[in-house]
Amino acid sequence: MAIDTAGNVDKTTYLRNQFEEVNGKCIDLDGFHDGLIEENVCINKGKPEDYAFGHFGIVMNNASIEMESRNIRIVNNRMEGMKFGGIFVIGEGHRITGNRLLRLNTAHCNENAAKFGCSALGEPDVLDTGIYLGSHAERPAPAKGNVIEGNEIMGWKMKSRCI
């Protein structure tokens, strides 16, 4: 991961970071809440085979029992060439606006499930969606009450699987 949080991380901003060739999640928001992810860039240029640990661009998580994923603003970021989706969302009160999620699902999930292990969390469509609204990560935390608008989502079958 390029940026990884853990524990109980609040009122934090990740602003204008640039990463290339990340073999994993670009930004892992485990324990992150009430913060801002803005104008970050993460670009992978290779094929999905080049990223054994390739993943989503931005992932919300909730391993810490001291927090709930809530009130995160994800604004004007660019995630390109992700092996799976662009943003994995759990929790509530998030604003996901103006992001450019390009060349997503380079693994061509679920069609290449056997080759790339395209199912996770018992939810068969989780890895082939541009912005995935999840029901849980480590603990239950259904995505609800979130604003998602003005995002550009492109990639393998994203016309039918964008959100």
Image: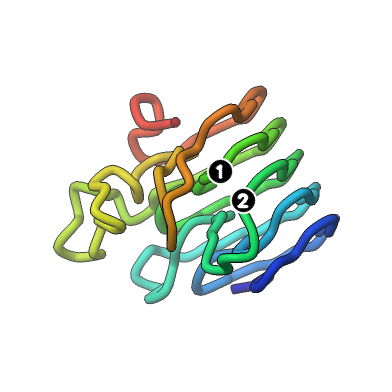
Residue that mark 1 sits on? 91
Q: Mark 1 packing: few (<14 Cα in 10 Å), some, or many (20+)?
A: many
Q: Residue at x 36, y 31 (%)?
A: 161
Percent x, y of residue 89: 52, 44
User: In the picture, which quadrant includes the C terminus?
Assistant: top left
Task: Please name the residue that numbered disc 2 is placed on.
Answer: 69
Q: Position of residue 144 (x, y in %)?
A: 53, 31
Q: Amino acid at mark 1?
A: Gly
Q: Residue at x 37, y 64 (%)?
A: 48
Question: Could you classify mark 2 by the number of other residues whose Cα lies within 10 Å: few (under 14), some (14-19), or many (20 or more)?
Answer: many
Image location of residue 82, percent across then percent down: 49, 56
Task: Evaluate whether residue 30 shows in this view.
Answer: yes
> Left or right: 140 with respect to 91?
left
Q: Nearer the viewer, residue 121 or 106?
A: 121
Q: Amino acid at mark 2?
A: Ser
- Dot 2 falls on a residue whose secondary structure is loop
Tell me which corner region of the image, top left, top right, bottom left or bottom right, holds residue 3.
bottom right
Q: Nearer the viewer, residue 14 or 139?
A: 139
- Secondary structure of residue under mark 1: loop
The quadrant the N terminus occupies is: bottom right
Residues marked 1 and 2 touching at CB (< 8 Å): yes
* In-image side of 129 versus 141 (left or right): left
Task: Compute the Cα span from label 1 to label 2.
Answer: 5 Å
Where residue 83 appears, as percent x and y from the top left, is 42, 58
Q: Which residue is found at the position 20% from the left and 55% from the top?
A: 112
Q: Quadrant of residue 138?
A: bottom left
